[in-house]
Image (spheres, grey):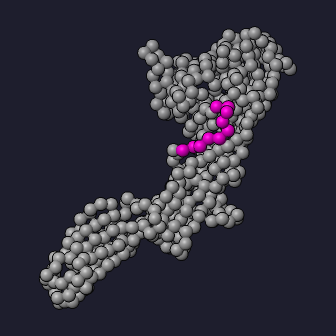
């Protein structure tokens, strides 16, 4: 394996056995869940909690994301175990030793981002089983399985040894350190799986979830999908079998996301960092009186506006049109014809849709008897809410009826007799006859629903 000594062996040994820094390291739990192994079990660490040094840390079922004092970030796979220890100077070429955070990986997988911060260099000295050691500066992925420590240099500098003969691992290359092969050969990591499309944009009012599809990575034993927020925070890690090449992502709150897919080999080592896919779950805000009428449809009144949040970078087309344009922050309902909104993120092969329909709620008012005479008869009024489009009735629409005799309001107490059904009894009223008894109905937002009237004879 091509290798070279970075420094004379004696100076390298001196650097690696130099006294550790007195100040203990600090690591903060940024996401996921983790606990510290104690004699009484595994004590959970709260979000934002500081981890103690020299204690065995175990990631939970969703993995864990940590940040060290110097800004280095660590991502532990589910159930991975890691011990963070003291800092130590290590040689990284010109510029003198770099203060490295030492740690020991006991099991699982680990992603390390120790990329330089401005002019400040950062490094990690990672120990595995027996004498396997790595010095990492930049981005790396590491896996420990069956006492084999495997690593891939995603970017930056990586040094590896099982003794004191360090070798440099170029970016884009991988290796494994075992007791039986102290001088392993460099190899190419698995090819990066590529997203081939899917539905990368949808709305919170649709039953159609986000969908990702990808190409097969030859040699992959499994895949792992990382879902990040638009600010880069790791939200979910989803393990996937090698026989799958698509996944639906339900149960996400509205927002912008980033999906990254990695292929894993038999040792759990990841492929190179893939190009991410941007996802958008748009939040549709309905105007007063607007309501969801189907799995991906809403009804609003003419002239009303829907708001669209998290639409940055999303393209929109109407009906069957092939012309897409950047989605705005609102849509105004014009006329009485339905419109189909089609959303997509560049690179997706399927659209997310939202059908916008004119509001078709109506109140059917019936008054009986038809030949009512006062003061002989009592009038019964029935109001039934219907949706002329055939869609189901919204549960949050409340009918507000108003009763008048001529132009004079009449107090009337309506009884609810079922969903969308009101009934009232109106006793004979004093006043000059004949006159029109009228019931007019609006909803709680003042939107007109319907009316009915009956001429009362003396």
Tell me what residue is drawn at x 70 percent, y 32 percent.
263
Q: Quadrant of residue 167?
A: top right
Q: Is residue 86 visible?
A: no
Q: Is residue 340 visible?
A: yes
Q: Quadrant of residue 78?
A: top right
> Could you say where residue 342 lies in the image, as x and y percent from the top left?
62, 60
Q: Is residue 246 magenta?
A: yes
Q: Quadrant of residue 404?
A: bottom left
> Could you say where residue 169 lies in the image, as x and y percent from the top left?
79, 24
Q: Is 388 rendered above or below residue 95?
A: below
> Could you say where residue 51 lies in the image, as x and y percent from the top left?
51, 25
In screen coordinates, is 6 left or right of 227? right
Q: Is 278 rendered above or below residue 115?
A: below
Tell me what residue is drawn at x 28 percent, y 71 percent.
382
User: Of residues 125 and 206, which is closer to you in this image?
Assistant: 206
Q: Is 221 rendered above or below residue 163?
A: below
User: Of residues 352 and 184, which is closer to you in this image?
Assistant: 352
User: Of residues 66 and 441, which is closer to you in this image?
Assistant: 441
Tell me what residue is drawn at x 22 percent, y 73 percent.
380
Q: Is residue 82 magenta?
A: no
> Could you say where residue 6 lies in the image, as x and y percent from the top left?
81, 20
Q: How many marks?
A: 0
In screen coordinates, is 383 left or right of 52? left
Tell me what residue is drawn at x 46 percent, y 65 percent.
390
- The magenta segment is 241-250
User: Of residues 134 and 178, which is closer to you in this image?
Assistant: 178
Q: Is 212 rendered above or below residue 289?
A: above
């Amino acid at each position: 394996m091509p290798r070279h000594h970075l420094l004379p062996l004696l100076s390298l040994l001196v650097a690696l056995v130099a006294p550790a820094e007195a100040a203990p390291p600090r690591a903060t739990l940024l996401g996921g869940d983790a606990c510290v192994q104690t004699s009484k079990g595994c004590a959970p660490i709260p979000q934002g909690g500081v981890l103690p040094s020299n204690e065995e840390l175990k990631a939970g079922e969703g993995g864990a994301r940590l940040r060290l004092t110097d800004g280095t970030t660590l991502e532990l796979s589910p159930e991975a175990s890691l011990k963070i220890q003291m800092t130590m100077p290590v040689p990284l070429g010109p510029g003198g030793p770099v203060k490295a955070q030492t740690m020991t990986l006991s099991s699982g997988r680990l992603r390390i981002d120790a990329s330089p911060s401005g002019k400040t260099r950062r490094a990690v000295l990672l120990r595995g089983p027996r004498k396997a050691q790595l010095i990492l500066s930049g981005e790396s992925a590491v896996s420990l399985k069956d006492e084999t420590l495997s690593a891939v240099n995603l970017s930056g500098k990586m040094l590896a040894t099982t003794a004191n003969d360090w070798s440099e691992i170029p970016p884009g290359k991988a290796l494994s350190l075992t007791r039986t092969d102290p001088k392993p050969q460099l190899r190419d990591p698995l090819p990066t799986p590529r997203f081939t499309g899917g539905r990368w944009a949808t709305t919170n009012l649709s039953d159609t979830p986000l969908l990702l599809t990808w190409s097969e990575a030859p040699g992959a034993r499994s895949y792992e999908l990382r879902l990040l927020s638009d600010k880069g925070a790791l939200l979910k890690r989803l393990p996937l079998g090698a026989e799958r090449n698509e996944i639906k992502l339900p149960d996400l709150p509205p927002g912008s996301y980033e999906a990254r897919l990695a292929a894993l080999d038999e040792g759990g080592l990841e492929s190179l960092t893939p190009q991410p896919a941007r996802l958008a779950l748009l939040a549709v805000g309905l105007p007063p009186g607007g309501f969801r009428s189907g799995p991906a449809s809403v009804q609003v009144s003419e002239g009303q506006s829907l708001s669209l949040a998290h639409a940055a970078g999303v393209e929109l087309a109407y009906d069957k049109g092939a012309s897409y344009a950047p989605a705005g922050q609102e849509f105004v309902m014009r006329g009485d014809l339905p419109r189909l909104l089609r959303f997509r993120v560049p690179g997706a092969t399927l659209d997310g849709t939202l059908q916008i329909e004119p509001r078709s709620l109506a109140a059917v008012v019936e008054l009986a008897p038809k030949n009512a005479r006062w003061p002989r008869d009592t009038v019964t009024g029935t109001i039934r809410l219907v949706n002329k489009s055939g869609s189901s009735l919204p549960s949050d629409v409340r009918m507000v009826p108003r009763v008048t005799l001529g132009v004079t309001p009449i107090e009337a107490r309506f009884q609810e007799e079922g969903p969308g059904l009101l009934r009232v009894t109106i006793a004979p009223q004093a006043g000059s006859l004949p006159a029109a008894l009228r019931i007019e109905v609006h909803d709680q937002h003042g939107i007109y629903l319907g009316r009915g009237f009956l001429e009362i004879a003396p």
